[in-house]
Image: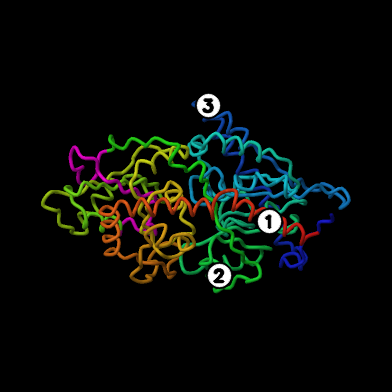
């Protein structure tokens, strides 16, 4: 099989000019400069804690040695898929990337390619890595140490386009040396508003292929100027074996004191769970207003929030208390229903136990690329209330959950995407749906069971892994 570089890539059709060559040299230097501080921090950490396994994971491994002779086509090995993503970061792109490589790893032999991973696109968190299931850690060691020549590779840049070559911030570039050396380059990305900015459109069009997770994204990317022939839908898998409610005991929530309100007494409260980053996009303000307006202490309903910081401090209890005061909500005669912030670290390996402790999941988001906590809750057979816009429209239906209508589209008012639009979920309809889930628990359980069935049939690692492996096989055949 003779593998040749594709001819449709913009950068391939023009000679590499001095500026591009300079960028390449700078990026190669950046690779080393980024790994050196990580190793230094790691060595210091090793004196305080046992981080030996992650040391092997973070070691520099430059596969694209300058001047290395290129193999002849007669001696080419099966192509390698080099998947670059924020594997050591607790964000959404990371959890997606883990789900993809876990799904894909079982198809390498049947589809005749190898697989390697490299961290890229975000900061590294030792705490996150140590909290991964042992199965994921073992897979990480195996795939990171896999042999992979860049000139024989299909590179997947799984991150936001600003991290692609040349990156707009400090990160390992993807592709590592630009677009000319790999066989084929795929951008796996998404967005949470109604558009992508012109710079991201330009970066997408440099790629040979763009994978997005939903029909919503296919339409949005094409409408904003990404070459339609390059855009393809590739849904995300969810590990239905890991997120299996039959395998776990519930996480203990009793010791977590409320930051607003109180529990109803000796009776067990109905538990709503929400998992999100503290940012406006996640609709935490809509959630708190609807919950506190609809329920009081005597309803025996509690809201538990697993919150992570997003360009903010972690004083979430104070933020919630201030929000309640500023909104002018009138306390019920019998007191507020309890709002609890889960202020202990919940490792990735313990997430199923947290979902197991809940009776329902709720996220009135203004926009999602996919919504990993939503599909994880669905895999755990929870009734789910989530906004009926953007990523969740790919999997959330009236049969397997409670799609939350939106009132209108509103403009993003701050941050880098000012002027974009996203959804404003209906606070009044959220109140209705939360009350319905509490009142008709059998319906909620029925929809939760259907949710898990749908996750298993459409989004299991086996199902999505085969789709992904077939997509890669199609690329290999095209190159041949």
Position in image of residue 165 (x %, y %): 64, 57
| Apparent side of residue 307 relative to residue 69 in the rendered image (left or right) | left
* The quadrant where residue 291 appears: bottom left
Pointer 2 residue = 198
Image quadrant holding the N terminus, namely bottom right
Cβ–Cβ below 8 Å for labels 1 and 2? no
Position in image of residue 198 (x %, y %): 55, 70
Question: Is residue 246 placed above or below 153 in the rendered structure?
Answer: above
Circle 2 packing at 10 Å, graded few (<14), some (14-19), many (20+), is few
Front residue of 188/296: it is 296
Image quadrant holding the C terminus, namely bottom right
Q: Alpha-carbon distance for marks 1 and 2? A: 31 Å
The magenta stretch spans which residues?
257-286
Position in image of residue 108 (x %, y %): 70, 46
Name the residue: 62% across, 66% down: 231
Pointer 1 residue = 470
Name the residue: 40% across, 38% down: 353
Local secondary structure at mark 3: loop
Front residue of 46/410: it is 410
| Apparent side of residue 156 relative to residue 458 in the rendered image (left or right) | right
Q: Earlier in the sequence, mark 1 or mark 2?
A: 2
Q: Alpha-carbon distance for marks 2 and 3? A: 45 Å
Circle 1 packing at 10 Å, graded few (<14), some (14-19), many (20+), is some
Question: Is residue 394 placed above or below 96 in the rendered structure?
Answer: below
Q: Which mark is residue 50?
A: 3
| Apparent side of residue 255 relative to residue 220 in the rendered image (left or right) | left
């Amino acid at each position: 099989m003779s593998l040749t570089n594709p001819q449709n890539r913009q950068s391939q059709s023009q000679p590499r000019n001095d500026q591009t060559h300079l960028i390449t040299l700078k990026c190669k230097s950046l690779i080393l400069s980024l790994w050196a501080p990580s190793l230094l921090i790691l060595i210091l950490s090793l004196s305080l804690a046992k981080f030996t396994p992650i040391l092997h994971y973070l070691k520099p491994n430059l596969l694209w040695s300058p001047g290395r002779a290129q193999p002849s086509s007669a001696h080419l090995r099966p192509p390698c898929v080099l998947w670059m993503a924020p594997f050591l970061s607790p964000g959404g792109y990371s959890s997606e990337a883990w789900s993809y490589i876990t799904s894909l790893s079982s198809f390498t032999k049947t589809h005749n390619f190898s697989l390697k991973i490299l961290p890229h696109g975000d900061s590294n968190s030792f705490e996150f890595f140590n909290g991964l299931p042992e199965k994921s850690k073992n897979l990480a060691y195996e795939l990171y140490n896999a042999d992979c020549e860049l000139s024989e590779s299909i590179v997947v840049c799984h991150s936001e386009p600003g991290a692609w070559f040349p990156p707009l911030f400090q990160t390992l570039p993807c592709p590592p040396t630009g677009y000319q050396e790999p066989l084929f380059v795929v951008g796996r990305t998404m967005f949470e508003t109604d558009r992508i900015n012109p710079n991201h459109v330009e970066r997408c069009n440099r790629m040979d292929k763009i994978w997005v997770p939903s029909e919503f994204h296919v339409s949005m990317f094409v409408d904003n100027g990404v070459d339609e022939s390059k855009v393809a839908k590739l849904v995300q898998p969810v590990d239905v074996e890991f997120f299996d409610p039959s395998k776990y005991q519930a996480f203990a929530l009793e010791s977590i004191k409320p930051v607003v309100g109180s529990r109803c007494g000796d009776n067990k409260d109905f538990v709503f769970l929400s998992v999100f980053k503290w940012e406006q996009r996640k609709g935490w303000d809509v959630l708190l207003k609807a919950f506190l307006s609809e329920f009081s202490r005597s309803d025996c309903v509690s809201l538990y929030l697993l919150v992570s910081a997003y360009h903010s401090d972690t004083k979430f209890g104070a933020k919630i208390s201030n929000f309640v005061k500023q909104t002018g909500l009138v306390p019920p005669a019998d007191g507020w229903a309890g709002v609890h912030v889960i202020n202990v670290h919940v490792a990735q390996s313990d997430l199923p136990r947290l979902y197991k402790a809940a009776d329902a999941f709720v996220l009135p988001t203004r926009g999602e690329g996919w919504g990993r906590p939503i599909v994880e809750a669905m895999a755990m057979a929870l009734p789910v209330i989530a906004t009926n816009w953007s990523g969740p429209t790919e999997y959330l239906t009236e049969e397997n959950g409670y799609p939350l209508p939106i009132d209108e589209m509103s403009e993003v008012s701050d941050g880098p995407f000012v002027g974009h639009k996203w959804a404003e979920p209906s606070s009044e309809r959220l109140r209705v749906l939360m009350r319905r889930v509490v009142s008709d628990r059998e319906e909620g359980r029925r929809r939760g069971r259907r949710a898990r069935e749908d996750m298993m049939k459409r989004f299991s690692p086996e199902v999505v892994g085969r789709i992904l492996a077939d997509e890669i096989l199609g690329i290999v055949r095209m190159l041949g």
